[in-house]
């Protein structure tokens, strides 16, 4: 009897406080309402990709920054108004490249241009699909995307505080943040592999090459030759608009070279290099570095889990007609 009560209590608590509302997601969510959704989004993303490669890292980063703050609900796409400072205008989001936003806006317009699909597909789902497409276009894995998200009803810059991983994070801080979204250390290391693409402004890592500690001005975990190259590209009074490739070896290819770079002391951020420096995570880095297929499989699985974070339903979300307007 006691066991039955315990099970009923556990069942009730799971109903009242669900860890995730991902149960509504499915790969064929739009099979009847918008059957050509994926091909419509794919065409738009490919056209945008042909215009600029920045489409790839910009869209991928946009998805991360969306999901880590209030869940995958397209709240990062919302524009600020006179009485509301939205997520995108938080300091941590000001470096999000406009090409990511433009990709989603264009895809949404193409989807809504089809009468059958108009006002049926959420901005959150379009962002999730566009992210898969850019990963694939850059040479990464093609994975199935679960669909059925609704768009969030709020977007506040204040909600971003403390929600995004910082470049100076250690392993405990990274694990804690990712665990708050139901993601494991292995998921975190796999998702960090997105730094095989994209770029960073110098001020995000300048402390590693000029003022690391009283004993060592340069971070001793940095490859010395790489540190010299970074100092050349990022002099002390560098223009803050100057950006450096996250992956110095294959910056335009989604591959496992990011992990090989870490083995050589060529992680740009402290939060990158710590994955190899800390013995608790080093074996996973070595595994991903030695086998591209293992990395791709883990990245795809982690992206699927990330895509389930904080999913909104018809009760606490909507389908936005304009992704930038609540």
Image (cartoon, rainbow, N blue to C red):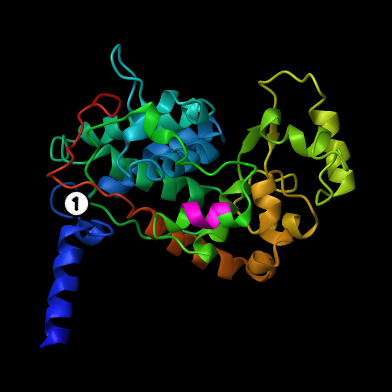
Nearer-the-camera pick, 197 or 267: 267
Residue at 26 percent of width and 53 percent of height = 147
Residue 99 belongs to the span the image colors magenta: no
The residue located at (18%, 40%) in the rendering is 317
User: Circle 1 is placed at which residue position?
Assistant: 30
Is residue 72 shown left or right of residue 253?
left
Crowd tier of the residue under label 1, counting other residues whose Cα lies within 10 Å: few below 14, some 14–19, many 20 or above:
some
Q: Most extreme residue toward the bottom, as rendered?
A: 1
Quarter of the image containing the C terminus? top left
Q: Horizontal placement of 312 versus 105: left or right? A: left
- Name the residue at 85% across, 41% down: 218
Residue 116: percent from the left, percent from the top?
Answer: 13, 40
Residue at the top extreme of this rendering:
82
On screen, 95 above or below 35?
above
Give the residues drawn in magenta, as a range.
Answer: 173-177
The image shows residue 268 at horizontal and vertical percentages of 71, 44
Residue 284 position in % (x across, y down)? 63, 68
Relative side of 208 to 154, left or right = right
Magenta region, mostly helix, strand or loop? helix
- Tell me the residue at 18%/65% (across/down): 13
């Amino acid at each position: 009897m006691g066991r039955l009560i315990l099970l009923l209590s556990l069942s009730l608590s799971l109903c009242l406080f669900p860890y995730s509302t991902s149960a509504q997601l499915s790969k064929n969510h739009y099979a009847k309402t918008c059957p050509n959704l994926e091909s419509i989004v794919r065409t738009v993303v490919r056209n945008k990709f042909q215009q600029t490669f920045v489409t790839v890292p910009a869209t991928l980063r946009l998805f991360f920054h969306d999901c880590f703050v209030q869940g995958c609900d397209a709240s990062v796409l919302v524009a600020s108004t006179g009485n509301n400072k939205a997520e995108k205008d938080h300091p941590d989001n000001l470096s999000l490249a406009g090409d990511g936003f433009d990709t989603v806006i264009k895809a949404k317009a193409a989807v809504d241009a089809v009468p059958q699909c108009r006002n049926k597909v959420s901005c959150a789902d379009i962002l999730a699909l566009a992210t898969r497409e850019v990963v694939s276009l850059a040479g990464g894995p093609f994975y199935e995307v679960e669909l059925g998200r609704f768009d969030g009803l709020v977007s506040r810059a204040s909600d971003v505080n403390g929600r995004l991983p910082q470049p100076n994070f250690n392993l405990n801080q990274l694990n804690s943040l990712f665990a708050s979204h139901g993601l494991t250390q292995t998921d975190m290391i796999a998702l960090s592999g997105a730094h095989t693409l994209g770029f960073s402004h110098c001020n995000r890592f300048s402390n590693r090459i000029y003022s690391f500690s009283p004993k060592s001005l340069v971070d001793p975990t940095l490859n010395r030759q790489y540190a010299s190259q970074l100092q050349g590209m990022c002099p002390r009074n560098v223009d803050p608009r100057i950006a450096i490739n996250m992956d110095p070896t294959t910056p335009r290819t989604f591959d496992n070279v990011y992990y090989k770079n870490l083995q050589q002391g060529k992680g740009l951020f402290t939060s990158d290099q710590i994955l190899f420096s800390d013995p608790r995570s080093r074996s996973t880095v070595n595994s991903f570095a030695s086998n591209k297929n293992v990395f791709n499989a883990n990245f795809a699985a982690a992206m699927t889990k990330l895509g389930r974070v904080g999913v909104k339903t018809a009760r606490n979300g909507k389908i936005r007609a304009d992704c930038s307007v609540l």
